[in-house]
Image (cartoon, rainbow, N blue to C red):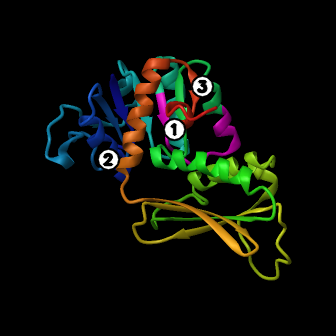
Amino acid sequence: MKLVITGASGRMGRMLIETALQTDGIILHGALDSANSAFLGKDAGEFLGQTTGVLISNDVEATLMGADCVIDFTRPEATLAYLPICIKHNINCVIGTTGFDDAGKAEIHAAGAHIGVVFAPNMGVGVNATLKILELAAKILNSGYDIEIVEAHHRLKVDAPSGTALKMGEVVANALGRDLKDCAIYGREGVTGVRDDQTIGFSTIRGGDVIGDHTVMFMGQGERVEITHKSSSRITYATGAMRAAKFLNAHGAGYYDMQDVLGLKD
């Protein structure tokens, strides 16, 4: 399977390239980066001390030609620019980018009518197992428990709360028969009054080089249940993304998430 990696000079892009080069059945077909990148024209494996023959480019259409799948962990505006070109050339997409508005999410969903799309805020296998655990916990702890979600990421992350935290909130809200849009609280300041027991609170921490920590707390009278996932390396996202790319190669057109890829849906 011929794979193109976007954001090739970034931290996640480099991890994806390294993982692709080490994954059986994957051929690194292309590497894309922004027009102002200092790495344009350089070999995609140079940071590893390897020569791959794949040069980093910002010519999207030329780079995508002949590819089977794109893995994209960049910014929403970049992802949405790649998407119509992928549809035009029948190239599957694995999208780990976060920070989309509702219109952007709808555009990605619609693309699944034409190509295979895996769209997930977190490609990590452990995180997706955690989502299933959260669904079960919410169904059991469905009364008498206040729910708070705390997430921490590195100082360079530009969107908040993280896509993973929002997905956790959606899973919990859905299990409780609620709509996260109606019950989420994203910040508290001043005299906020007594807590509404139907709300789901979010707290965001940004600092240092934290890869990604997420904790969901179910707080009742006399006890607190905490479900935590901590990432110590981006490799978990990269290996999950490779698994998603292989899934699309086998399944073709459709809109999927990592729960589909991992066979976790009921």
- What amino acid is labelled 3 in the image? Ala
Q: Foreground: 263 or 119?
A: 263
Residue 108: x and y, percent?
A: 60, 32
Identify residue type, mark 1. Answer: Thr
Front-most of 44 and 94? 94
Residue 99: in magenta span: yes
Whether label 3 touches label 2, CB < 8 Å: no
Mark 1 or mark 2, which has the lower sequence index? 2
Give percent across and percent down for residue 128: 53, 45
| Residue 112 placement: quadrant | top right
Give above or below for 243 relative to 188: above
Q: What stretch of residues is rendered in magenta?
A: 93-106
* Disc 3, SS: helix
- Please count the marks in the image: 3
Cα–Cα span, label 3 and label 2: 26 Å
Residue 79 is tagged as 1
SS for callout 1: helix
How far, Cα to Cα, is label 1 from label 2? 18 Å
- The residue to which callout 3 is attached is 111
Instruction: Identify which residue, 194 or 175, lies in the foreground.
Output: 175
